[in-house]
Image (tube, rainbow, N blue to C red):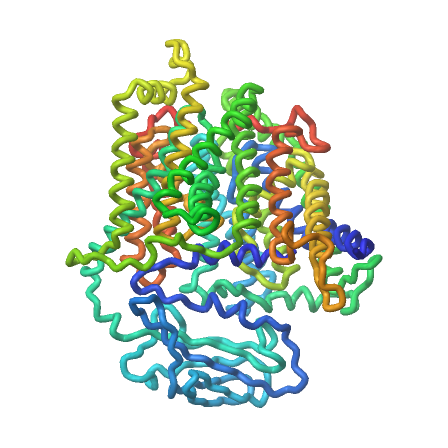
Amino acid sequence: MGRQAEHRNSRRGRVAVRGFLALVGLSFVAPLFSSPASAATDDGEIVAIVTEQRETEDGVQKIPVAGVRITAVGTAASIEGVTDSSGTASLKVPKQGSYKVTLDVASLPAGVEASPESPTTIDVNFSTGVTIGSGAKSVRFFVGDARRAVINRWELLPQTLINGIKYSLIIAMCAIGLSLIYGTTGFTNFAHGEIVTIGALVTFALNQNGPRIHVLLAAPFGVAASALMAGGFERQIWRPLRRRGTSLTSMTIVSIGLAIGIRYVYLFFFGGRNRRYRQFVGDPEIDFGPFGITPRDIGIMVISVIVVVGVSLFLMRARLGKAIRAVADNPDLASTTGINTNRIILTVWLIGGGLAGLGGVMLGAASGVQWDLGNILLLLMFAAITVGGLGNPFGALLGAFVIGMFTELWTWVFPNVVELKTLGALITLVVILLVRPQGFLGKKERIG
Amino acid sequence: MKWDLILSNSLYTAVSANAVAYILVASGLNVHFGYTGLLNFGQAGFAAVGAYSLSIPINRFDWPWPLAMLLVMVLSVVLALLLGIPTLRLRSDYLAIVTIAVAEIIRLFLNSVRFTWLTGGNDGLQGFTRFMENINPFPDDGVTLWAQKVDGYRLWLLVTGWVLVAVVSTGIWALMRSPWGRVLKSIREDEDAARSLGKNIFAFKMQSLIIGGFVGALGGMWLVLDKQSSQPQDFSTTFTFFCYTIIILGGVARAKGPIIGTMIFLFVIQFVDITLQQATRTTPQDPTPLLPTWLVDDNNFSQIRFIVAGFALAALVVVRPQGIFGDKREQAFDVR
């Protein structure tokens, strides 16, 4: 089954991590050449391309590097070549076979150095993998700008922390709803990511197509779409299933099926590209000394702090909020005190959906709108609510901070493996479950 | 529309070596979810371990293949222990979240640029199937089944694969009829009752996780043997959820469930996909496709099978949770 195309789309989102030292490696080579390997004669050619990835204000620039010595040692002989002005060296080998192609680091021009993210020795085997035409193999070397290494690690920490806070707030907004729904119904909703995504997609549609209104005007529609989708699911699917006595596991699996179906409907209509709103793109950063923030990110952080504090106060003080917490604590007891649990649950879906939509709109502004944006975040949301304590909305907030900060701090501690930054969060999850399975604010009786 | 091509290809897909891989991965999941009631959302992780424990040692370190197969076994057991020890004493949601997280960790690691020297990264690994090609008794040009050409290597994998399926399914069937299997089912039905009879629930769950995980790893191995390439994107969580669709389709907690489920699932998916491919195709002679491009075109038709698969999973659980051939008493959905 040719599933690569779809997965390539989904992968692009995950690979496109942005960090200070993020030099993307070989990922984009594969789609370029993909004709099958077939060779008429025995001799072959190895085409080596050396590219410098230079961090500039407009993003990463790719510059070919000339005058680099490349050697291929292998089956028949040892061949040497030097790259030309297009950064390309062609090494004619007398016999196809396996070769070790090495970039001579000493021959790199001044100001350019081997980057820790990509290897300087690549194995080439003529019998496997991608081939250009007949009998030619291509290898790519990526080198970096030596100047970037001068930056002191500690100077990057404030910026990392700021990014972590922004990321945590977005996770928190998306996860509060998931946590409240779990708390009131015990149901793990795998389609929550799709509720997040629809907020961003509707905002994008109104902003880029149709009426082309300002993103701040379009955002309320996105939030409403998410809330309506969540409320609609509760009324049309989850409430009837609960009434039928369907088990929570069945409902979880139903939500997984819905999530897959809806996600690919998004892909069908929206396409696999990561796209931007019309506003808040490429604004200059405001300099705060040790770190810089764009006005957009300040806006994201301010709004989410206000919303998170507002939701917390609502849950703590308001009558409805107290009723929600009562249902989350013990649904049976709450209903005997005269609380209409079904109405509370619907309210929770609407509020949780709206918050998720707002999170989606902000994530769309921060890192682009994408068909699986919510799904990528889903695992981090689960990690957040589990770490914080399942069912407790304040636990979700705390968990979101732990998860968001660990994710961003990973890029600071391991700057050369930024593509694995969610690993930090997932490992945190597993470790915390080992040490304190109920999470920070969870109740012990929930766990076993 | 070339209906003979469409039908023969869909039918072949339903019994191919690829189907064998799905059957094995789903059979492992059936041991976890169907018989024991373990909510494992990370079966793709076991499959990935099976695939890469074969391809990495052979491709990167020139191991002999029996040693690599031994590694498949060892590492799938190790993964089961890693997953089980922290979570099997907790409620099923925790196992679900940890398994899905660990499966993603494995996939992200395999996909990572940093570890390309080991795993091949995005492009994956190739050239580890020679041992299987060398003992292939079929001629290279293979056979033509109706309108479907099958090369010798694929035919060889198909035949050996179905032998493996027969062995594994019979084994699972026999195990589940044994007293040991009845303990697993009693854990699924009522954990406390089983515990009150003096059974060590944790040990039984762990054994189930290990056996199902190993069968899943065998499936992952077969998947990459068939593709002759192991790539991380084949082991996303969607793979796990398709296996849920398969075991629910074929009947939960039945040894032949995964076989029937896989055949139906792959036939339908392939039929939808290849029919749409034909209906949206344009050629220089015939520039207008059969279906209007505003509806579906040759760029997005391949999304439709995922839409079908996803909504089918949701609808099945609501309408017929025991599956098409399942036994309603064994539907195993009240996992706690």
Image quarter (top left, top right, bottom left or bottom right) of the C terminus of chain A? top left
Task: Say if residue B46 shows up in the picture.
Answer: no
Q: Is residue A235 left or right of residue A427?
A: right
Image quarter (top left, top right, bottom left or bottom right) of the N terminus of chain A? bottom right
- Which quarter of the figure has residue B308? top right
Give the residue at x 51% y 81%. Answer: A99
Give the residue at x 29% y 35%. Answer: A307
Which residue, as the protein is rendered here, is positioned at the far left?
Answer: A289
How many marks the image carries: the answer is 0
Q: Nearer the viewer, residue B133 or A292?
A: A292
Q: Nearer the viewer, residue B245 or B139?
A: B245
Q: Nearer the viewer, residue B166 or A345?
A: A345
Q: Height in image: A157 above or below B244? A: below
Q: Height in image: A54 above or below A208? A: below
Q: Is residue A123 left or right of residue A115?
A: right
- Which quarter of the figure has residue B247? top right
Q: Is residue A309 left or right of residue B333?
A: left
Which residue, as the protein is rendered here, is positioned at the far right?
Answer: B146
Task: Say if residue B124 shows up in the picture.
Answer: yes
Residue A234: x and y in percent read 49, 27
Residue A190: x and y in percent read 48, 37
Residue A387: x and y in percent read 34, 37
Q: Nearer the viewer, residue A182 or B181?
A: A182
Residue A245: x and y in percent read 56, 20
Give the residue at x 56% y 55%. Answer: A6
